[in-house]
Amino acid sequence: ASRKTGYKWVARFKEGGTAALADQSRRWQSHPQTTPALMVEQIVALRRKHPSWGPKKLGSWLSAKGYEPPCASTIGAILKREGCVRPRRRRERAGDYSDGLAAQDAPNAVWAADFKGWFRLKTGKKCYPLTVSDGFSRYLLRCEALEHPDELACREAFDALFCEYGLPMVLRTDNGTPLSGRYGISSLSVWWVKLGIRPERIQRGKPTQNGRHERIHRTLNEDVLKAGAIRSRTYHQQRVFDRFRKEYNLERPHEALQQQVPAQLYEPSQKRYPCPLAQPDYPEDRDVYTVQRDGSIRIPGRALFLSSVLAGEPVALRTEEDGAQTVWYGPLRLGTIRPNGRFTRGTRPSRQHSDAPE
């Protein structure tokens, strides 16, 4: 070692003895851009006085008072370090049931259901139009004026609809309640699976995937709501919707149908209703579990929560080639258990997966 290094070690020994000869941290003792302690105290005190203020508001207020606060990102880091920020709970969102959407190539192959945005009747009471259409023929199967967009009202509407027209192969909806649920599955979709209908959800923020049905909403808005055909009572408004549906199906030509009317292409389904409810049947190579009352299944090593609406229902686990396990309820992929144990709900559109079990 050099003479300079030798003098350094001797000085350390004289100052702290043998313990001072151990390796010491090379971290800087100070930094020219460190926020002064007094400013940190002011930021923390101001935040506690105004808990709803974010970094930008805090910085602007301090600047207006003649201080020189750090940038907003630094203020945010200070608040987080001092425990002034409550971590935001991550909201778990369900993925898509499948990578693609079913083809609308025949009557009753795909039905689409959705709520037209609510509006107020003349009495000020809200009305929630529930619409259902056949994707192939554009036939408007239902336009129901509901007072409350809840599961019970929807089930009654679909029950009457199935009695009149039979059952579709696929029923496509968006991700809103009650047609869907918090974890991508609802009591209605469980009921549909038991009837032999495959529920299908479009991707979030992509209403164009249900464009044919959204186009009906546009016509409904122009011919009824903007035309001022709004009544005072729900049953009077239902009469307006019934007249609109009749004209839409029997009189209004559609350019997409070569100027034919939907009634010329639509015919009721061969799958009749009512029919007995049946739980999904799985191949023998699947591990089948019954969902507990709390909405979870007990698999080796853990309890996996799926959804409380599946209580008492059988779900199946299938082991994939990469070691992951996919969780199915009938034709619906509920999620994937990765080899590292992480559970991902639904299907990520960016990845390719095999088809549902037979």
Image (spheres, rainbow, N blue to C red):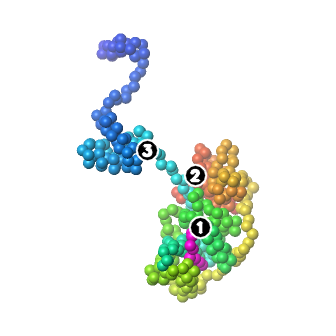
Q: Earlier in the sequence, mark 3 or mark 2?
A: 3
Secondary structure under the numbered disc 1 in the rendered image: loop
Q: Could you tell me residue 106's position as x and y percent?
A: 61, 76
Foreground mark, 3 or 2, reads 3
Q: Is residue 121 left or right of residue 336?
A: left
Q: Earlier in the sequence, mark 2 or mark 1?
A: 1
Residue 109 visible in rendering: no
Residue at x 59% of width, y 84% of height: 263
Q: Could you tell me residue 12's position as x and y percent?
A: 36, 15
Q: Which of the numbered marks, if any, corresponds to residue 37?
A: none
Residue range in magenta is 140-150
Badge 2, how many Cα within 10 Å: few under 14, some, many 20+?
some
**Residue at the extreme bottom of the image, as rendered:** 251
Q: Could you tell me residue 20's position as x and y percent?
A: 40, 16
Secondary structure under the numbered disc 2 in the rendered image: strand
| Type of amino acid under label 1 | Asp
| Type of amino acid under label 3 | Val
Q: Could you tell me residue 103's position as x and y percent?
A: 59, 71
Residue at x 63% of width, y 54% of height: 306
Secondary structure under the numbered disc 3 in the rendered image: loop
Q: Is residue 104 left or right of residue 274?
A: left
Tag 1 residue: 150
- The answer to whether 340 is drawn above or below residue 284 in the figure is above
Asked whether residue 149 is drawn in magenta, I would say yes
Q: Is residue 238 left or right of residue 68?
A: right
Asked if the residue under mark 2 is in contact with the one under mark 3, i.e. CB atoms within 8 Å, the reply is no
Distance from disc 3 to disc 2, alpha carbons, whole Å, reads 28 Å
Q: Which of the numbered marks, if any, corresponds to residue 85?
A: 3
